[in-house]
Amino acid sequence: MAIRDEFPLLAAAEFDEVVTHSYVRDVALPSGRRLALVTLDNGRDHTRPSTLGPATLFELGDVLEAQRARGAAGEIDAIAVTGKPYFLAAGVDLSNVADIPDRATAGELPRLGHRVLGLLHEAPVPTFVLINGLALGGGLEIGLHADYRTISSAAPAVALPEVFLGLIPGWGGATILPNLIGIERALKVVVENPLKQNRMLKPAEALELGIADAMFGPATFLESSLRWADEVLGGRKVERPNQPGAIERTVKWPIAVKVARDMLQQKIGTVPAAPYRALDLLELARKNDRAAGFAAEDEAITDLAVGDQFVASIYAFNLVQKRAKRPAGAPDKELAKPVRKVGIIGAGLMASQFALLFVRRLQVPVVITDLDQGRVDAALEGIRGEIDALAAKGRVSSDEQQRLKALISGTVDKADFADCDWVIEAVFEELGVKQQVFAEVEPHLSETAVLATNTSGLSIEAMGSVLAHPERLVGFHFFNPVAVMPLIEVVQTPATDDATLATAMRVAKDLKKSAVITRDTPGFVVNRILAKLLGEAMHAVEQGTSFEDVVEAQRAFGFPMDPFVLLDLVGLKVGAHVLDTHHGAFPDRFFESHALHELAEAGVLLDKDAKGTAKGIDKRARKIVAKHTPKGAVPLSVDELRLRIEDGLADEIKRMLDDGVVAAPEDIDLCMILGAGWPFQMGGITPYLDRVGASERVFGGTFHSPRIEGAKA
């Protein structure tokens, strides 16, 4: 019976699947042994990774069954699986999962994965997976089911990203991996990395963890892997020092899972379902019972795949993977001007971060300037020290290290900016200061140079009022830390021309950032929404609501940190400035906070331990806030405050869309996901406001059609 016949619901379902075929050829190894090599290939060019939908798995299963029969008959000595150039497989076809019609059909998908990939385990001959390229999710799980794995040193990434998408590694990953590399390393791969903006592993890391048994260079990867496989078949011993022993299983394992669970509750709360289901599976894996583990994976993936959070995650995933790559309102990219040299005004921390990012990504000369040579020299020393640190970690080669350091220079003479094509300021957040530095540098620039400001919310049009050519000024708002945060808000004024805007979009892409075009308005997108959240938080505590109740009221949104931790992170003075700016622009909707100003002057808010971890609110901060509570103030309950915030957000976002701040609700969602850490499983802030009824309560409608669903609070 064909494997397809074992899964009738999936076989009958109609999916728009690009099938990845399984091509087989026999390879004669140096010893004379014969190996059946299965190559996964979807027939597309090298920009389209292979994925694993139902039809793909049916074909792979039939091919593996045939090779197992050949192995049992003595026709071959081993089975190996690899991929087309640059890819093993990028995991399950997510569009298919999102289109599964019902729970019964959804339940067949994890069982199909276990059935097919499990054919590599306990086969009549040894099995190998040769990870020649990208291996994500189910692609990596193919390898985990095999007896041995090699990896190319040029593979771009290896990961189990399912938790990031509201799922769990459901084709054996949560059960097999901890029994291969130990619980602490598995926790990192399965839970910690996905929650760190979906961090991937490099090949050397996969080798060190024990996911791969050997690593070879790309030029001879297949030949070297086959030679190594032949040696293993001939008796070569494969060491796996990270496999857990009895002490780890009985003592360390439960402790590690408990610590991870406590850490999750502290960092992300209890709204996201997938991380906790993953922990349950990793805890169960301690028994090293594949049948029990796979059954639990089947149940977990079925529950999650038909749940609201996965639907929300797919909406967010599509925003990041599709909309971010085709920004709304972007002019013809052919209008972009070449950027052959970058100038940075300022030599502080932010300017230094800019310099390092620009020189690494653009590989062009970067010159920085400031008021005196001492500041410039200190910044240059720091930037070059960061480059040296990257080299010490193996992230840049010694040749690149020297080249990058040579591309960085400094000056106090703005005439040295004459040949810069792109000039960005990183000076004090005050309109007059920014106007002054732009007015000083503009006369030295060529007519084609673009001027960019990193302001977080000041009027860019007002900055341009002092320029002879305001059409070449654009907002280019990074988020901190610059190297990590993926969003740039590209802000156009009424004067910004298409060539300037196109250049900004090209630079953002070359910096490997996602750009969203916004109109010039206070706070743009992210800071305007965060100002609403932080302003409501400060107003609530000033009205007598406890800090703890404010944190609880905002917990439903699933942000990675509570509003007071966020205030502490951005800086109390910066937070006070942001609230003042928005209160000045929209006094009827944004609160000013006198208490926050006093907290900023005193430098107190959070009570922290010796390591700097927040333990709660400082007693001095409570006393300062209490002084600002008016007589007769009525504290809000958690539910009252949550509803107030939800309705305030729905109102503000509707106004932003009506005013054309961005093109569509999806752009608001993209900004919040990439710039503020809005969780994937929440699906975007506008679908959330639709789900909880805030949109209907505020303006009698919704931001999206009913088909956009997502996580329940």
Image: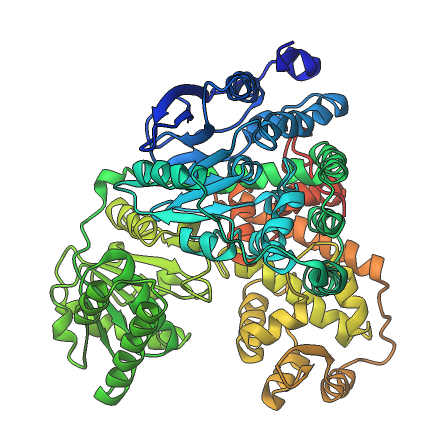
* Residue drawn at point x = 76 percent, y = 57 percent: 644
Q: For this view, does 259 lie left or right of residue 33?
A: right
Instruction: Name which quarter of the figure residue 539 lies in.
Output: bottom right
Q: Position of residue 353 (x, y in %)?
A: 36, 70
Residue 220 vertical placement versus 539 (above, below): above
Q: For this view, does 535 lie left or right of residue 469?
A: right
Instruction: Name which quarter of the figure residue 430 lies in.
Output: bottom left
Q: Position of residue 158 (x, y in %)?
A: 47, 46
Instruction: Name which quarter of the figure residue 28 lies in.
Output: top left
* Residue drawn at point x = 78 percent, y = 54 percent: 643
* Residue drawn at point x = 18 percent, y = 50 percent: 338
Q: Is residue 703 visible?
A: yes
Colour scheme:
rainbow
Residue 573 vertical placement versus 557 (above, below): below
In front: 268, or 24?
24
In front: 656, or 547?
547
Q: For this view, does 52 lie left or right of residue 642?
A: left
In front: 130, or 642?
130
Q: Position of residue 690 (x, y in %)?
A: 70, 40
* Residue drawn at point x = 62 percent, y = 56 percent: 182
Residue 393 vertical placement versus 309 (above, below): below
Residue 495 vertical placement versus 401 (above, below): above
Q: Position of residue 290 (x, y in %)?
A: 71, 39
Q: From the image, which quarter does the N terminus lie in?
A: top right
Q: Is residue 44 visible?
A: no
In front: 168, or 572?
168
Q: How many labels sit on residues?
A: 0
